[in-house]
Amino acid sequence: MHTFVIAEAGSCHDRSPEKAKRLIEKAKEAGADAVKFQFWSDSVRLAARRNAPELARTYEDYRVPDNWLPLLKAYAQSHKIEFMCTVYLLNDVLIMNPFVERWKIASFEAADTAFIHRHTLHMKGKKEIIISLGMGQELHKMFQGNPEISTLYCVSSYPTESQHLNLFRMSAFHHDGLSDHTQSTQIGMLAVAAGARIIEKHLRLDDTKPENPDYKHALDPGLFKKYVSDIRWAEAVMGTIERKPVECEVKNMKYKVRP
């Protein structure tokens, strides 16, 4: 099995294109499959949409400019890692469509069926939609059985205290994976053991500013690399469900008592 690991760069670029490129480099070095940014064309509209006027300034300060998109996409391709970018406004779906191979929808927008439908219009039969479902799991049934939609369990608290994660809910509600907002390096491998095939985790740089809104729930490059390494270790430990002797058992088969 292979878990699709998304390195969530989020706001940790500190509005610097060079830092954004370094986040791509660090995600690749850590062994992630994709690196994801966040895009909104209008911070005022986003703040109004989310009933969060107090966040308008933050949205503006950490906005990814339009002209970054082709540059970051090309830079990710040159490092052989998938470029992803979440959008939050209807019109931004059309802007982002040429740059991504799959969609990621945040938990705050998960109940907006018109917004989700706008994503499906640009799937072209190829793009998977990944949706985080935090703040209760009442929406999970709406997406079950749709092969083009994968759901991630998450707790929409930034950061999430590990004791509040309730990871059993991931498998109980048949989610495909986890969006992890904890500060722990161990949650990823636990999620793999619980059946996750997709894991999203925030990544920051060593020099990401502490006042950055994503700083507290992101891991620095060293810890993020350990996080991914532990996921790969868990994959190996979980193995397969084939009912046959493991290769290292073969030499002892001769001692097996036959009825």
Image (spheres, rainbow, N blue to C red):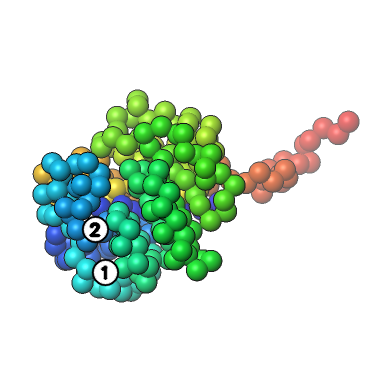
* Residue lying at 44% horizontally and 66% vertically, measured from the top left: 122
**Is residue 33 visible in this depiction of the protein?**
no
Give the left or right position of residue 81, taking residue 148 as reference. left
* Residue lying at 39% horizontally and 47% vertically, measured from the top left: 112
- Circle 2 — which element? loop
Residue 156: horizontal and vertical position, in percent? 32, 36
Q: Which residue is mark 1?
A: 69
Residue 40, which numbered label?
2
| Viewer-side residue, 224 vs 66 | 66
- Circle 1 — which element? helix
How many numbered marks does the figure carry? 2
Residue 53: horizontal and vertical position, in percent? 15, 43
* Residue lying at 49% horizontally and 39% vertically, measured from the top left: 140
**Which callout, 2 or 1, points to the residue nearer the camera?**
2
| Viewer-side residue, 90 vs 164 | 90
Q: What is the crowding at mark 2: few (fewer than 14 residues within 10 Å), some, or many (at least 20)?
A: many
Residue 207, which numbered label?
none
